[in-house]
Image (cartoon, grey):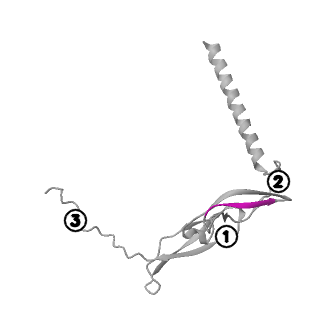
């Protein structure tokens, strides 16, 4: 029984090593685009939407004399104004400005993906909502306790 257990452990370890090495080889092949390059200084441009100004798209990368395209996504909301590659931490929305009927908030850069140039701080605005968040009284809950 002990011999069977030892053999099983050895087989499992060998299987783990083989799958780990296979995963490394797959990553190495995909790393360099055409021809499996060893280039470490890839420079990527902005994400360009395939159709319109947002949604699925591609970005082109260059390294030495090589180029490759990578899939990406441009947000279809207010974030598309500063790009999908600049990640910001935003504060709370400010009060509604009565003259412009908008409110704003600022964000501080947290991370720039693909080494793109991002503004350190940005300000975004949106229209003020006129929705009243109070629950209407009397219409709902007629069946409770009556």
Please tell me in which quadrant of the rendered image residue 117 appears.
bottom right
Foreground mark, 1 or 3, reads: 3
The one of 2 and 15 positioned closer to us in this rendering: 15
The one of 43 and 34 positioned closer to us in this rendering: 34
Residue 106 vertical position relative to residue 42 in the rendered view, above or below? below
Foreground mark, 3 or 2, reads: 3
Assign a secondary structure to mark 2.
loop
Distance Cα–Cα, label 1 vs label 2:
24 Å
Assign a secondary structure to mark 3.
loop
Magenta residues (range) = 55-62
Horizontal and vertical percent position of residue 46: 70, 66
- Main SS, magenta residues: strand
Horizontal and vertical percent position of residue 81: 60, 72
Please tell me in which quadrant of the rendered image residue 57 appears.
bottom right
In the rendered image, which residue does mark 2 sit on?
39
In the rendered image, which residue does mark 3 sit on?
139
Write the residue at 69% across / 34% down: 19
- Mark 1 surroundings within 10 Å by alpha-carbon count, few (fewer than 14), some (14 through 19), many (20 or more): some
Q: Residue furthest bottom?
A: 99
**Quadrant for the N terminus in the image:** top right
In reply to whether residue 134 is colored magenta, the answer given is no
């Amino acid at each position: 029984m002990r011999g069977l257990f030892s053999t099983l452990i050895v087989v499992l370890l060998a299987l783990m090593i083989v799958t780990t090495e296979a995963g490394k080889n797959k990553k190495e092949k995909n790393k360099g685009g055409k021809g499996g390059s060893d280039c470490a200084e890839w420079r990527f441009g902005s994400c360009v939407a395939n159709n319109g100004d947002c949604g699925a798209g591609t970005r082109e990368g260059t390294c030495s004399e090589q180029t490759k395209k990578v899939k990406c996504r441009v947000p279809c909301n207010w974030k598309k104004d500063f790009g999908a590659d600049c990640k910001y931490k935003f504060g709370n929305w400010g009060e509604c400005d009565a003259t412009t009927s908008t409110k704003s908030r600022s964000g501080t850069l947290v991370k720039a993906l693909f080494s793109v140039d991002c503004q350190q701080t940005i300000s975004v605005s949106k229209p003020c909502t006129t929705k009243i968040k109070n629950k209407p009284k009397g219409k709902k809950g007629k069946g409770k306790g009556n």
